[in-house]
Image: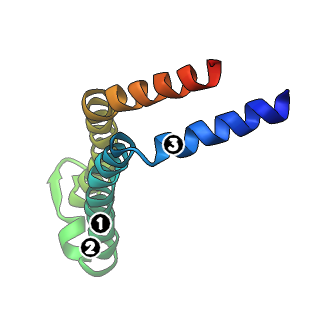
Amino acid sequence: MAEKVSAEAHAAYQRIHATEEFAELKRSYFGFVVPLTAAFMAWYLLYVLMSNYAHDFMAHKLFGNINVALVFGLLQFVTTFAIAIWYARFAARRMDPIADSLRHEYEQEIER
């Protein structure tokens, strides 16, 4: 029985994997993740390069003991959380409905 369910599950997955909805789900995911990852990595690399090669600029005091390097470092955290929130909203709006529909189809096929 377990082998039959496993074969049925595999066949259902293969069928769903070949659908246009699954392709749209992958396109949506990669269309969001790849550009944002590249942008964030460029932003992080800028921070690292500026820290290494622009000492005077990064050491410039903005107020009190707060300098540009500290602000850049804190902005890394802000950017990370902003991207996480943005992705969660994007996924809930664009990807979750498709994924829920595909999961429902999959579960329907397995129960037969």
Residue carrying label 1 = 47
- 3D distance between C-alphas at marks 2 and 3: 50 Å
Q: Amino acid at mark 2?
A: Met
Residue 68 to residue 25: above or below: below
Quarter placement of the C terminus: top right
- 3D distance between C-alphas at marks 1 and 2: 5 Å
Compared across the picture, whether 3 is left or right of 33 comes to right
Quadrant hosting residue 100: top left
Q: Residues within 10 Å of mark 1 (few under 14, many from 20)?
A: some
- 3D distance between C-alphas at marks 3 and 1: 46 Å
Observer-side mark, 2 or 3, equals 3
Q: How is the image coloured?
A: rainbow
Instruction: Please tell me which residue is depicted at 34% across the width and 47% down the height of the picture.
Output: 29
In the rendered structure, which disc, 3 or 1, sits on the residue that comes first in sequence? 3
Q: Residue furthest bottom?
A: 53
Per the rendering, the mark at residue 15 is: 3
Q: Of 10 and 98, which appears nearest the observer?
A: 10
Per the rendering, the mark at residue 50 is: 2
Assign a secondary structure to mark 1: helix
Instruction: Please tell me which residue is depicted at 30% across the width and 45% down the height of the picture.
Output: 24
Per the rendering, the mark at residue 6 is: none
Tell me where residue 60 appears, x and y as whole percent.
18, 64
Q: Amino acid at mark 1?
A: Tyr
